[in-house]
Amino acid sequence: MKAFVNDGAARVIETPNPTPAANEVLVRVLTAGICKTDVEIIKGYMGFQGVLDHEFVGIVEKSPHSDLVGALLELRRRIP
């Protein structure tokens, strides 16, 4: 899996695929955007280090609810 991280330098890295807990879903990200806050973080705002790109669209790959697998994840969709 790829992740866009800021650890003093903004870069894309390879990371292991996460294993969701019993009450979580695994989402395959199809596309992601960078917002103004991400740009400010890259410039040093608040000293944040970690994974960026909270604005994305994806498909549910794994879920404790089988009816959600394959569903397009939409903004504000509540997943039980």
Image (cartoon, helix red, strand yellow):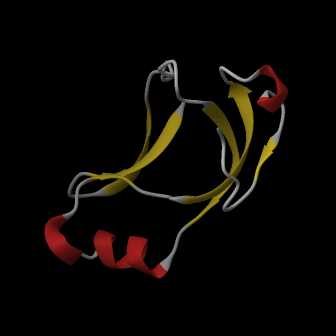
Residue 44, horizontal then vertical, whole percent? 21, 73
Q: Nearer the viewer, residue 15 or 29?
A: 29
Residue at position x 84%, y 27% from top? 67
Q: Is residue 30 left or right of residue 70?
A: left
Where does residue 3 sit, x and y in percent of width and height? Answer: 47, 42
Q: Is residue 55 toward the left or the right of residue 14 in the image?
A: right
Residue 21 at x, y = what percent?
A: 47, 20
Residue sticking out furthest to the left: 47
Q: How many marks?
A: 0
Residue appearing at x 22%, y 76% in the figure: 45
* In-front residue for pair 49/58: 58
- Residue depicted at 67% across the width and 24% down the height: 63
| Front residue of 47 and 12 | 47
Vertically, is 33 above or below 14?
below
The residue at the point 83 percent across, 38 percent down is 71
Q: Position of residue 80 (x, y in %)?
A: 64, 38
Give the residue furthest to the front: 80
The quadrant of the rendering that contains the N terminus is top right
Tell me if residue 16 comes above or below residue 3 in the rendering.
above
